[in-house]
Every structure is written in C-alpha cells, then in structure tokens.
Amino acid sequence: MTTPKCYRLSPNGLSLFVRVTPNAGRDAIEGAEVRDDGQAVLRVRVKAVADKGRANAAVVALVAKGLGVPKSTVTVAGGETARIKTLAVAGDGSALAEALAPWIEANGR
C-alpha cells in the first residue's frame, strides 16, 4: 500500500500539510503519518508555545531550515490556530518534494 503524500504540488511550489505539537521538549520534524481519516501529514514538534503566533513562527523556521529554503518562502496558508496546518512553500515544487522525501520514506506509516 502506498503512503499518501503530505503535500500537493502547486504552480508556485507546494502546499505542505503538517500536524504541529507545540510546547514540545525539542524542535523536530518527525516524519509523515497517515491519520485515521486518511489524510497524510508531516509531524512537527516545536518548543514554542501556541501563543500569539510563536508556534507558527517556529514551525515556519523549522520547515524552512529542513527544506534548505529562506523562511520568507514558507507561510501558513491555513489552520493558523489549529494543530493541522497547511504551509505554502514557494519555489520549485519538484525540488521541494525531493527534499521532503527522506522524512516521508523513513517515517511514513
């Protein structure tokens, strides 16, 4: 069975679906998972608390660093106050998807 992708290519880059755990012990991208509803998400933990956008800023910084892109290319496109968020990442969608591959393949379940 193929693991559904936690991203969707777009004309300007890709949309990345993440599940955020704020106030965690460490900042980490833990890999992809398929939720009970069938949606694939990338699990992300950040030390920042979910207060006044701090966790969102930490997620943007962590994902940008992990993908090797500037923070300015990553924005929260949906789910500002929810644990499940959609991040818009500007750039070459295929190259960005390739950069995600190690997290998806190593941890997809």
Image (tube, grey):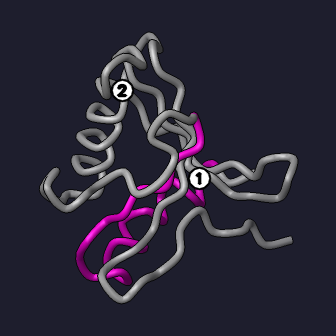
Q: Which mark is residue 55?
A: 2
Question: What's drawn in magenta, residue-wise?
Answer: 83-107
Q: Do the CB atoms of the residues marked 1 and 2 lie less than 8 Å apart?
A: no
What's the residue type where badge 2 is placed? Ala
The x and y percentages for residue 52 are 31, 21
User: Considering only vertical position in the picture, is 14 above or below 27?
Assistant: below
Q: Is residue 62 left or right of 24 when viewed as pictured? A: left
Q: Is residue 42 left or right of 25 when viewed as pictured? A: right
In this orientation, which residue lies closer to the viewer: 3 or 35?
A: 35
Q: Does dot 1 land on a helix, a strand or a loop?
A: helix
Q: Residue at x 23, y 77 (%)?
A: 91
Which one is closest to the eye, mark 1 or mark 2?
2
Most prominent secondary structure in the magenta stretch? Answer: helix
User: In this figure, which residue is indicated by the disc labeled 1?
Assistant: 106
Q: Residue at x 56, y 49 (%)?
A: 42
Q: Residue at x 35, y 35 (%)?
A: 56
User: Considering only vertical position in the picture, is 38 above or below 57?
Assistant: below
* C-alpha gap between disc 1 and disc 2: 25 Å
Which corner quadrant of the image does residue 59 belong to?
top left
As drawn, the residue found furthest toward the bottom would be 11
Q: Earlier in the sequence, mark 1 or mark 2?
A: 2
Q: Residue at x 75, y 52 (%)?
A: 34
